[in-house]
Image: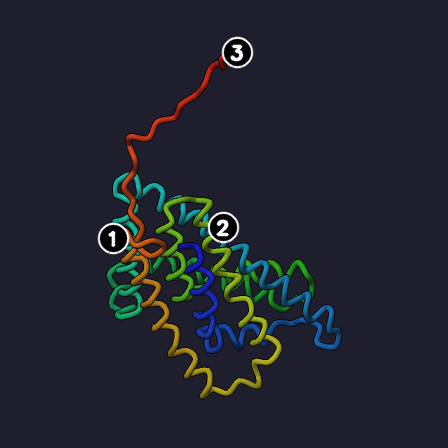
Amino acid sequence: MLYSAFIVGLLGSFHCLGMCGPLVLALPVHAQDKVKAVSGRLIYNTGRIATYSLVGLLMGMFGQSLSFVSSQQALSVAVGVLMLMLIVSPNQLSQKFSFVSPLARFTSKVKQQFALEFKKKTYRAYFFSGMLNGLLPCGLVYIALAGAIATGNSVSGMAYMALFGLGTLPMMLVVSFAGQYITLQWRTRLTKVVPVFTITIACLFILRGLNLGIPMLSPSAVADTKATIQVNCCHKK
């Protein structure tokens, strides 16, 4: 299911037009120097993807711990259902969790530091700003993190979020260089596409967990317990 991460990032990045577009357009890169303008934006996005990867590592570890108390299939179904809930009723879902308040305080500190770094015009500041941007609240990122949890493995979780970040890169670069030419009407139309593909990915996770024996879609997870390994200790002359 790692391939779904890139798809979520690529198709879901239309969401970035409205949410992150103004922020990316305001990035204080050297507009007069094309090399610095391109490199500055690439470094900024590298920092963002680095944060996604680190958080994906943690979410993969969390999913791995959950797999000890439940099967990988049950975890996949649960993540798929969670994705659907995030799309259908995000406000109602967030009100049920008590961690929202601490998260808001953490986000406030991140925004303060982001504002300080955002004013600088150094490559270090671009990278660090990108890393901080990766910590800002985003419904699309939350959906990707749910997918990272479903991998049930720290390395796979990190790879999932890295691929998700790479999927968002083309749109982020388009927005940063030509965002002013994309009208609000088009942004609204493209944003409406996001829930459709998110629901599709959620259904894929649910199908994956149902263990229907469909190759590449819902593969059988029955382990072959009768498999044996033969080792030849010596050979005949």
The answer to whether mark 1 and mark 3 are in CB contact below 8 A is: no
Identify the element where label 2 is drawn: helix
Residue that numbered label 2 is attached to = 54
Decide if residue 152 is on the left or right side of residue 172.
left
Residue that numbered label 1 is attached to = 212
Quadrant where the N terminus is found in the figure: bottom left
The answer to whether mark 2 and mark 3 are in CB contact below 8 A is: no
Q: Position of residue 32 (x, y in %)?
A: 74, 77
Q: CA distance from mark 2 to mark 3?
A: 55 Å
Identify the element where label 3 is drawn: loop
What is the crowding at mark 1: few (fewer than 14 residues within 10 Å), some, or many (at least 20)? few
Q: CA distance from mark 1 to mark 3?
A: 49 Å
Identify the element where label 1 is drawn: loop
The amino acid type of the residue labelled 1 equals: Leu
The amino acid type of the residue labelled 3 equals: Lys
Q: Quadrant of residue 80?
A: bottom left
Q: State the residue at coordinates (37%, 46%).
A: 152
Q: Which mark is residue 237?
A: 3
Sooner in the amino-acid sequence: mark 1 or mark 2: 2
Q: Which residue, as the protein is rendered here, is positioned at the far front?
A: 237
Decide if residue 147 is on the left or right side of residue 203.
right
Sooner in the amino-acid sequence: mark 1 or mark 3: 1
Mark 1 vs mark 3: in front: 3
Q: CA distance from mark 1 to mark 2?
A: 33 Å
